[in-house]
Amino acid sequence: STPLIMDVDTGVDDACALLLAARHPALDLRAVSCVGGNTDVDSVVSNTLTVLDAVGRLDIPVGRGAGRPLLEAPVDARHVHGEDGMGDLDWPQSARTPDSRHSVELMRDVLRDAMSRGERVTIAPTAPMTNIALLLRTYPDVAKGISQIVFMGGAADTGNATASAEFNVFHDPEATAITLAAAAELGIPVTMYGLDVFYDPVVTRQQAEALIAEGGHGSGELAGRLIAFQCDRFERASATIGDAGAVCAVIDPEGVTCSDLPMRVELAGAWSRGRTIVDRRDWSGDHAHDPHGRSESIVRVALDVDGPRYTRLWLDTVRGH
Ligand code: BDR
Ligand code: CA
């Protein structure tokens, strides 16, 4: 199975992603790193522990990482994810405490341990990439232990936090830019699972109700209540599995159609800060057209997804106890 580290800001849909990552037999979830984003980092840690407890994965270490973006003050998304950042479900809280290491050091140790055994780990950030930027700049030696980064964030088309920018990149644009630059320098392939595909795999309220009926405070009930929360909040008959789609893309890469495209992160811009500028001009494969000669990263950008296929993958994995 694929060794995996998740980096999350749990987050209703991060919770959906964690349920999948912790339960799917093709994945070997070795650590979860937490960052401030949808809510403050301490709430992210406790939400993350709560999800892992619900699926009996007390063995997975959870690290507390950066509480704020590299440059600017944090913004949160409680208006989307609820006051506690995870749907205000009134779910039994975990009694566990996080790992004593900062999550950057936790990831470093997990990666070095994998390297010592000749293994390489996929990193799947579904949150602002503050921790990942810090990891790659502080401990570049661990790059050899990373097989790929598959992140939820950005958009080739429109944003959500602003018309231009997707929330995770908007929250810490410098961190995304640093991560892309470092990955290019260190030879780590990067896939962007952005807003162009994010909203496509959906679960209906009816499917959510069936999961909730499983009860027992297990995986299925939690999964169903997370989806039902989103249906209520947005007054819709279905809700996206969101960040969980990025985990689906790790398990089943053929469910997404990707193109290798040059990309930059807008760090200035009056109204476009945090935009991922994906160059979709047709240069017949020759991307050396930047008149300024400045480097850009080539990112595998998910442009289309088989939504029902990922919905099925998610439902089949999260149902049950
Ligand atoms: C992303 O931002 C967060 O609100 C979600 O958890 C997801 O990672 C979508 O823009
Ligand atoms: Ca998230």
Image (spheres, rainbow, N blue to C red):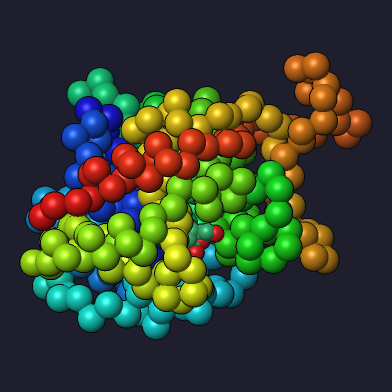
Q: Nearer the viewer, residue 66 or 248?
A: 248
Q: Quadrant of the N terminus?
A: top left
| Residue drawn where x is 72% and y is 40% of the image | 278
Q: Residue at x 44, y 61 (%)?
A: 238
- Tell me if 180 is positioned left or right of 135 in this view: right
Q: Quadrant of residue 15?
A: bottom left
Measuring from the top left, give residue 190's x and y in whole percent: 52, 33
Q: Is residue 22 left or right of residue 150?
A: left
User: On screen, 248 above or below 252?
Assistant: below
Task: Name above or below for residue 192 compared with residue 93.
Answer: above
Could you say where residue 161 lies in the image, as x and y percent from the top left?
63, 66
In the picture shown, does residue 242 fall above or below 309? below
Q: Residue at x 10, y 55 (%)?
A: 321
Task: Tell me the residue at 39%/58% (across/down).
Answer: 204
Res 101 seen here: no
Q: Position of residue 187 (x, y in %)?
A: 52, 25
Q: Position of residue 254 (x, y in %)?
A: 45, 26
Q: Residue furthest front?
A: 206
Q: Is residue 251 left or right of residue 133?
A: left
Q: How many marks?
A: 0
Q: Nearer the viewer, residue 73 or 210?
A: 210
- The residue nearer to you, when weighing 13 against 255, is 255
* Quarter of image, res 296: top right
Left or right: 95, with 77 as reference point: left
Asked whether residue 229 appears in the rendered view, the answer is: yes
